């Protein structure tokens, strides 16, 4: 049988958020490749081999998956969220570009998933209802100066800003600096959503102002959304809603 | 029975991209509310009422759905893609904020879906694999000057840029101006993805340079992604891949 490689997004955590397309690919695979906590989200299947790797090993994991597919295996690389957003799809493309010419024949597919900012936004209301951006706060793969520059320009553009990977044990200071930059650019009253482990039993949502936001409100499982100048918190008995209006009239703002 | 209102994302078009969570909500609803082409994507169900409306009627549609839920109906508002991205979730929040106090008790939920840029990105490779932004090119609800400003700042930040609603019959000129602004800011060689009706039988993908991009390459069903300075097209026998590397080292670029 001919090998193939599919990079599939498992969404934010709940099985009911995995698309049928991804479930079908998982059922057809001979081999699953991925970071162990993500593999653990896929129910075991008889005869299916699992290849777990550590978190920082994206490129090695991508090469291993391509080697398996080149050897005729049916391989699914599992990603949390969407594989195209700060995840495994780009790593597989990098491995392909720099790999042997024979890998050029491998059938490679990417299957989308619900990325963290869409899940967080849904649970809070609609904070991404107008123009927005997504910035990965990890400086493992880019200079911190570039992150700061993007934060300032995103605030100047008045985007709502989704912050992926805000904080980890290895990077305790970056998020505090990001918050300080955003406070200077946007003021203390701007609403901020801390959305942790949404659509899982550990879900925790918190909306504060930038003035109230503290670095320790985020961890590795938290997605942060900083509102635009138009983002509003609407209190209501059935649960507050955080949203950005569709219209930038008449306030304008920028 | 107590009424409720759920705003559900149908994804880009294929049934296999609708999450089980959304399918379950559709099965439980007494009433479906939405733009007719989106309602037509949901198979009919005995006893379920459908309330179709025209495209530009988001706020009236939101109010109608809230009135039904307040009257005890189980209502699903259907959105294409993700309801939180340039879609119905923000319209419902607006209607709630400005509606009667009694609507404050209504149970409102947003169920995420695969938004167009994630679907387009998956089909092309991983063009959103690094920091990116999403800009709605429609100036129905914001000044055109704000769109131009955001395009310039997004290019300066070196984001990959997803352009929603690039072009319609009512707005034939805006997309041409957007392309001109981006050519000035990014140069002629920057890759651009035109992704039309992805994951449907009418799917068409095209990757050109900004210098080659013409306004008539896009229509209302097209999602456009303009790459960052790092975005690359990798030709391969099994199909070219467009991707943005995870790392901004060593080139840096900005």
Image (cartoon, coloured by chain):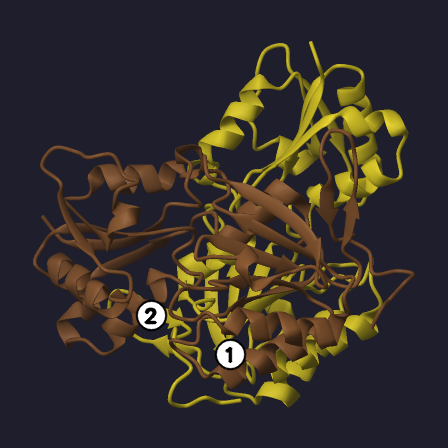
Chain colours: A brown, B yellow
- Of B8 and A200, nearer the camera is A200
Q: Which mark is residue A6?
A: none
Label 2 crowd (10 A; few <14 / some 14-19 / many >=20):
some
Residue A251 figure quarter:
bottom right
Left or right, residue B27 beside residue B7:
left
Q: Earlier in the sequence, mark 2 or mark 1?
A: 1
Q: Residue at point 54% right, 69% down? A: A175
Secondary structure under badge 2?
A: loop
Q: How many marks?
A: 2
Query: Taking the image as drawn, is residue A6 in sight?
Result: yes
Residue A177 placement (x, y as % from top left)? 58, 75
- Of B150 and A220, nearer the camera is A220
Q: Residue at point 42% right, 51% down? A: A81
The answer to whether B241 is drawn above or below residue B95 in the figure is below
The answer to whether A244 is drawn above or below residue A24 in the figure is below
Query: Taking the image as drawn, is residue A154 in sight?
Result: no
Left or right, residue A44 beside residue A173:
left
What residue sits right under mark 1 in the picture?
A: B228
> Which quadrant is home to the C terminus of chain A?
bottom right
Left or right, residue A140 beside residue B108:
left
Residue B165 placement (x, y as % from top left)? 67, 59
Q: Residue at point 64% right, 15% down? A: B48
Residue B176 placement (x, y as % from top left)? 70, 75
Secondary structure under badge 1?
A: loop
What residue sits right under mark 2 in the picture?
A: B240
Q: Chain of mark 2?
A: B
Left or right, residue B124 beside residue B164:
left
């Amino acid at each position: 049988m001919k090998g193939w490689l599919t990079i599939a997004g498992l969404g934010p955590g709940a099985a009911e958020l995995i698309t049928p397309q991804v479930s079908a690919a998982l059922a057809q695979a001979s081999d699953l490749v991925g970071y162990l906590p993500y593999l653990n989200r896929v129910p075991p299947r008889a005869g299916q081999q699992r290849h777990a790797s550590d978190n920082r090993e994206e490129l090695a994991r991508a090469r291993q998956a391509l080697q398996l597919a080149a050897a005729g295996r049916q391989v699914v690389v599992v990603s949390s969220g969407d594989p195209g957003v700060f995840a495994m799809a780009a790593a597989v493309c990098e491995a392909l570009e720099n790999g042997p010419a024979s890998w050029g024949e491998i059938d490679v597919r990417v299957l989308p998933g619900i990325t963290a900012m869409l899940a967080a936004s849904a649970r809070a209301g609609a904070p991404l209802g107008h123009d927005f951006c997504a910035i990965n706060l990890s400086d493992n793969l880019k200079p911190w100066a570039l992150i700061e520059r993007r934060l300032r320009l995103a605030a100047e553009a008045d985007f709502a800003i989704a912050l992926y990977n805000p904080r980890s044990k290895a990077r305790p200071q970056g998020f505090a600096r990001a918050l300080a930059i955003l406070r200077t650019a946007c003021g203390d009253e701007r609403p901020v959503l801390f959305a942790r482990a949404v659509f899982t039993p550990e879900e925790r949502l918190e909306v504060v102002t930038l003035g109230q936001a503290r670095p320790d409100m985020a961890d590795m499982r938290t997605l942060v959304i900083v509102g635009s100048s138009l983002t509003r918190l609407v209190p209501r008995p059935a649960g507050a809603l955080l949203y950005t209006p569709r219209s930038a009239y008449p306030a304008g703002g920028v």
